[in-house]
Image (cartoon, rainbow, N blue to C red):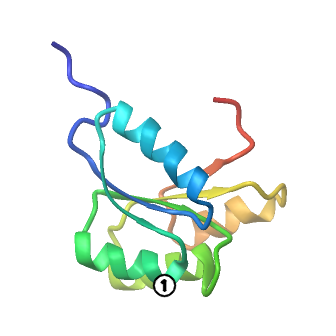
Amino acid sequence: MPSLPLSGKRILIADDHAVVRMGFRLLLEGAGAIVVAEADSGEAALSLYAEHRPDALLMDVSMPGIGGLGALERLVARSPKARVLMLSAHEDLQIPSRALKAGATGYLSKRAEP
């Protein structure tokens, strides 16, 4: 039986919308990933990242508190090898560039087709 694409990968999801977290959890677990925790703010994402040390962090750009970009900058300063995929529903074309310059591994628009 072939393994799933994300088989065994430990993922932390950070988004301030519970339904978005649930949707990504279902997609990731369906691909074999293990969602180790969910955060609803940048501060919670940093705390949970330190606690769980996931293989990757899926994080929204805009969240309460320091937000995703602020959390990304702090995380990369502490853990330069962190793998972070940033998410956003914003149409501002500067956001992907800012996220990648801040150290994100990648960027995904929430407006992208499945």
- Left or right of residue 37, residue 102 in this image: right
Residue 54, how many percent across, how many down?
Answer: 28, 62
For the residue marked with disc 1, what is the amino acid?
Answer: Glu
- Along the viewing direction, whichever of 23 and 112 lies nearer the viewer: 23
The residue at the point 45 percent across, 80 percent down is: 44
At x 60% / y 67%, what residue is drawn?
16
Q: Is residue 106 visible?
A: yes
For the residue pair 18 and 66, the one nearer the viewer reads as 18
**Quadrant the N terminus occupies:** top left
Above or below, comparing residue 5 to residue 79 in the picture: above
Q: Can you identify the residue that label 1 sits on?
A: 43
Q: Secondary structure at mark 1?
A: helix
Residue density around tag 1, few if under 14, some if 14–19, many if 20 or more, within 10 Å: many
Residue at x-position 62% and y-position 87%: 65
Residue 73 appears in the picture as rendered: no
Q: Where's the C terminus, which quadrant? A: top right
Horizontal arrangement in the rendering, residue 95 relative to residue 75 (left or right): right
Q: How many marks?
A: 1
Q: Quadrant of residue 45?
A: bottom left
- What residue occupies the far top of the structure in this picture? 1
Up the image or down, 15 lies above or below 64; here it is above
Q: Position of residue 79 (x, y in %)?
A: 32, 77
Q: Position of residue 77 (x, y in %)?
A: 41, 84
Relative to 114, is 1 above or below?
above
Indicate the position of residue 29 as horizontal and vertical percent values.
35, 38
Q: Residue 52's quadrant in the figure?
A: bottom left
Q: Quadrant of residue 82?
A: bottom left
Residue nearest the viewer, comparing 74 with 65? 65
**21 relative position to 51: left or right:** right
Going 56% across and 63% down the picture, which residue do you hit?
15
